[in-house]
Image (spheres, grey):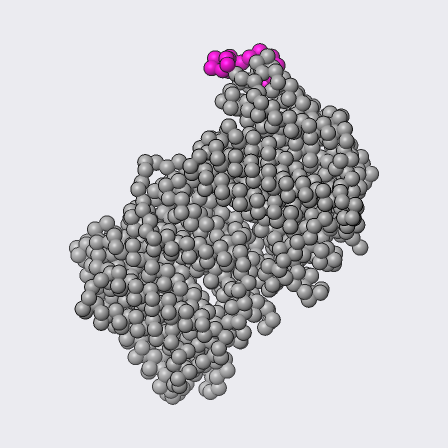
Amino acid sequence: MQLLGIIISLLGGGVLALIVGRQSAAASRWLSLVSLAVASVFYASLWFDTTDPQATSLWLLHMDWPWIARFGIHLLLVTDGLSLVLIGLTLVLGYVALLSAWHEINHRCGLFYLNFLFTLAGVVGVFSALDLFLFFVFWEVMLVPMFLIIAIWGHEGRRYAATKFFIYTQASSLLMLAAMVGLVLLNLQQTEVWSFSWFTLTQTDTSGSLGMWLMLGFYLAFLVKLPGLPVHNWLPDAHTQAPTPGSILLAGILLKTGAYGLLRFVWPLFPDAASSFAPMAMGLGVFSVLYAAKLAFAQNDLKRLIAYTSISHMGFVSLGIFAWNHLGLQGTVMQMVGHGLSSAGLFAIAGLLQQRLHTRDLDKMGGLWGQMPKLAALSMLFAVAALGLPGLANFIGEFMVLVGVFQVAPWAASMAALGMILAPVYALIIMQKGFFGTAASTQTAGTSNVLDLNTSELLMLGVLVVGLVLLGFWPNLIFTITVAPVEYLMHLGKGG
Amino acid sequence: MNWLALTSLMPLLLVASISVILLLLLAFIRDHKLTCWITCLGLAMAAFWAFADMGDAPQQVTPLLIMDDFSRLLGGTVLLVSLACGWMSYTYLETADEIREEYYILLSLAALGACVLVASNHFASMFIGLELMSVSLFAMVGYMAHSKQQANMTLEAGVKYMVLSGVSSSFLLFGVALIYAYAGNLNIDLLVAAEGPRLQSGYLVIGSALLLVGVAFKMSWIPFHMWTPDVYQGAPAPVTGFLAGAVKVAVFAFAMRWLMMAQGGYLDLLLLGLTVMAVLSMVVGNLLALRQNNLKRLLGYSSIAHMGYIIVTLAASATLGAAALSTALEAAAIYLITYASMTMLAFAVISQLAAQDRRFESGTLAHYQGLLYQQPLLAGALMLAMLALAGMPLTAGFIGKYYLVLVAVDSQLWLLLSLLVLGSSLGLYYYLRVILVLCKTPVGDSRLTLGASEKLLLTLLVAVTLWLGLYPTPAIQWVQLAIQ
Amino acid sequence: MDSQYIDHAMVLAGILFCLGLVGVMVRRNLLFMMISIEVMLNAAGLAFIAAGSAWGQPEGQIMFLAVITLGAAEVAVGLGLTLLLFRHHNSVNVDQLNQLRG
């Protein structure tokens, strides 16, 4: 029931925010905060259920109501440790994004918070739905509010970016729909039962060439969302043009839905097809890591640069998943969380800079360290987190992924390790161009009174820093929860 | 004809009596509100009767009409569409400089024709129903001929519709004549079962092909779509709604009876023709829609594309045996119902806007700029309609699209499936364009008012569109009942 | 009628039908277009008569009656539209109908 509580409190909060937003923008902000808080309370109770020694089962929560009886479709909301971690990440980043929206979003607030909370609800649904039909519904529905967030509150090229984002993801998910239907029909043939349930479909025999085609349908949809080369093209535009809270949501959690899909659906449903496709997928992963890192160097636009680094880091995720061993998968989960926190931090900083300087162009920045030391120090921290400094969450993730990949494909691991060398270069580009050196002439003219961080901004970034450091030093916080589900997924994914 | 047959025919009789009552009434009293009320009440009663009869035994009323659950379900749908159309016409006509009352006579006649078409079991009744609908529609499309603002457009649309509809009727009739020459009777489902001096099957092939051409004109399948964009744009908005909703449902219902239920009446040639039209409609329809700048015209191309998608069900019923036939029929019926609900929602919004300012239907999309902030209810409803047409989950459109994908995968129509995916992806672009225009910053401030009855209509249509998407189980059960 | 003659009748009907179709396509005068449509409809009617007589059934003639009725109904509405067109443009040339495009 807690899961439904989380989703409903977010949806209800969104509707209420729209209604009160007509009278007062502040009220809609506070209302969104309250609804997030209510959702967090539900989440906390879920969390305490897991530490309850009696709850030894793998699946923490099981809500199963019939929905469309004709096709055996159920409202099946289930969580295991993996979902729990990702839902937690969603809520934390929800707070961060809300704080960043607090001052940045000034017009049509009610509508903004409606879309904002609906996106969160959609993502929570994606992380917990284990009926494939329901999963697909959440998967698509979270796009619409995100599309509106980019299209209404974004920057100069917002309409183009929003349309591109929507068409890429929607077109690929239509392929997933076809593959999903194919899988269900296959299961119908084998068992003569209509079912969209993950638990049933993982028992379906999907060996053979049909399984490969179906797997590719799923893979493509998740690859677009991840995003991986060569279908990454929507991401730089969408991230750059989205308002800061939108970028935080996109980079922090929407990308993770793609990784989650690969982890939860592609391998367990199609073990044979996935394992024979793995070298190809790892090759694409390596390619993503290196090529996106190279592209990142060429960017002047701060947000665009961060967007390309996201692609590069998600390449590691793709690698870790297709290595499909314990280290690789645990590392992937950690990398997902670490990247969620660090990229959210970087995008938040880009947003703060844009508010202050009215530009995202790195060439027009410079010497900011002197003007706003706190902001610069935190940027440094997020940048080195992204490049994988030991002691922070990303390091653990990337290191484990590489070790895991090395066991199955040394070539992939060694090439991807190059990515870890490239990462410091672009991280340092951000720092050097933006924060060191002399103040650029264009900026000093109008912005002599550039302000350093205020309390609420410090709070926002502080949450992320705490998360990164905590997980960096105490990764078991996550690993103890995810070890059982990862084992189970691996068991399913080994196939016959 | 016994009592039972008569009562089962009651929906048709009710609709027919509306037009008679109105004809008589208008000789004494001219009152727009009263006329509209009578029409809407009559249509509502007829629709209720049709749905209430669901589950009863099929009644063959003379050799011409069959009132089975299929006729009741789709006939009821057509009647509800007509009801929505009559309802939205009230405000639209109130603001027109034109005689208003006769419009409702035409509307009820067109609805009657559509119902006869759905229930027809015989080519003669099919022909009568189709023509009753079409001829009433000529007049409805060209109805605003005396209005200063609209005369040019509406006349042009009316003339174009009349000429092309006449041509299509001729094709259809000639085809039926050839089929009759081959089979020796005019029963739709007895085409091949006939005994007698059998002629060369060339008659059947050519006749079926010509009949298909006639149907294709009405369904606006490419390459027989030429009239569609012009007529959609020029006709008054509620009439366009009727064209997009009721006409398509009724004609396709006939196509289902002819091509899917009449076992063995199928020919490979027809399948080839259908596939070609499906491919063209999905691809070209969507491509042409991309550049449109008038919302009604855009929806015209969108309806071409949607009618292309639905051919998948016809193709599927031909490729597989009886087992898949019921799934294909189910998919077709569900798709028709969901399409009718979302397209009526779109046209209801356009009608309400056009009632206040005709530029909303005749002008460019730019008139809709910023509507989301000026008229949240109307713009929200339009947005929902666009998302539904694009096939987003939780709206009626997704259920329809899901069914099509299911049928296409089940019968392994990979070409049509890939084009369905491609077409839907192209389609997203122009649906999103409309949504983006709605979200832009408004220019000037337009004062639009919305009466209680319009709000109620919109709320009902929104509710139906969402209900079909959120909880389709009852609708699916009804459809399954209807296709047994 | 012998069944071999039905072919002749059908060919005649087919020729009439094509003539009518060509007429609709090449003529620009709305009146003549409507006449061409009538020719097409009556070609279909002829085909019905021939088929009915080949089978020795009344259905063909009944359908012909229906066709005539339809023709009349279409002409009634069509002439109304033609009249309105003439009032607006002072001619019945359909090339003047060029407002709707996109």
Q: Quadrant of residue A38?
A: top right
* The residue stretch that appears in magenta: A434-449
Instruction: Tell me: B21 left or right of B438.
Output: left
| Residue A348, percent from left and from top | 58, 28
User: In this view, which residue lies farthest toward the right?
Assistant: A407
Q: Is residue A222 visible?
A: no
Q: Is residue A305 above or below residue B114?
A: above
Instruction: Tell me: A369 left or right of A416.
Output: left
Q: Quadrant of residue A347?
A: top right
Q: Quadrant of residue A432?
A: top right
Q: Of residues B71 and A472, which is closer to you in this image?
A: A472
| Residue B419, percent from left and from top | 54, 54
Count of picture labels: 0
Q: Residue at the spot x=34%, y=42% of the render? A: B367
**Magenta highlight on residue A79:** no
| Residue A395, percent from left and from top | 74, 29
Instruction: Tell me: C1 left or right of B310.
Output: left
Quadrant of the snapshot with the C terminus of chain A: bottom right
Q: Is residue A468 above or below residue A132?
A: above
**Magenta highlight on residue A448:** yes
Q: Residue at the spot x=70%, y=42% of the render? A: A47
Q: Is residue A205 visible?
A: yes
Q: Residue at the spot x=47%, y=62% of the render? A: B337
Q: Of residues B85 and A105, which is closer to you in this image?
A: A105
Q: Residue at the spot x=57%, y=67% of the render? A: B327
| Residue B432, percent from left and from top | 46, 44
Q: Of residues B103 and A29, which is closer to you in this image?
A: A29
